[in-house]
Image (cartoon, rainbow, N blue to C red):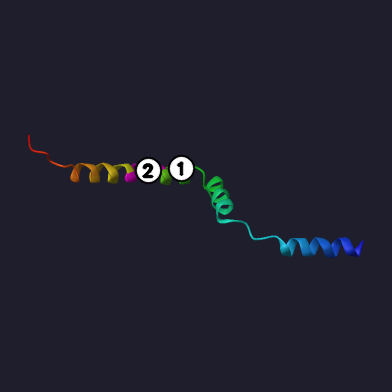
Amino acid sequence: MSNKIISDEIAQKASPPPSFVKLAMKNMVRKGSQSLSHFGLTALGFLGFILLVAVIGKPHIPQ
């Protein structure tokens, strides 16, 4: 019986800490709509930046 308790304690100590991905997913589930709104704002900002770079960097070919 005591061997099982000791092996359980060793297994708990040997297991690695949760990964950043798991922690981020747990946080996202906990915060809910705030995470989705931040993701949406980030996506819109990124698309706006890409479009701005495309407009500014457009080559002007003379005809």
Residue at 40 percent of width and 42 percent of height: 40
Q: Quadrant of residue 3?
A: bottom right
- Say which residue label 2 marks: 43
Label 2 is placed on what type of residue? Ala
- Measured as percent of width and height from the top left, residue 15 is found at 70, 60
Q: Which quarter of the rendered picture does the N terminus lie within?
A: bottom right
Residue 11: in magenta span: no
- What secondary structure is found at the residue carrying circle 2? helix
**Which residues, given as a range, are shown in magenta?**
40-46
- What secondary structure is found at the residue carrying circle 1? helix
Label 1 is placed on what type of residue? Leu
Q: Give 54 or 10, whichever is nearer the viewer.
A: 54
- Say which residue label 1 marks: 36
Q: Is residue 11 above or below residue 53?
A: below
- Measured as percent of width and height from the top left, residue 34 is found at 46, 46
Residue 21 is left or right of residue 43, and the answer is right
Q: Quadrant of residue 43?
A: top left
- Measured as percent of width and height from the top left, residue 59 is found at 16, 42
Q: Which quarter of the rendered picture does the C terminus lie within?
A: top left
Residue 5 is left or right of residue 22, and the answer is right
- Number of marks drawn: 2
Residue at 55 percent of width and 51 percent of height: 27
> Which of the numbered marks, if any, corresponds to residue 50?
none
Question: Which residue is at the far right?
Answer: 1
Dot 2 or dot 1, earlier in sequence: 1
Q: Quadrant of residue 37?
A: top left
Label 2 vs label 1: CA separation? 10 Å
- Measured as percent of width and height from the top left, residue 21 is found at 55, 52
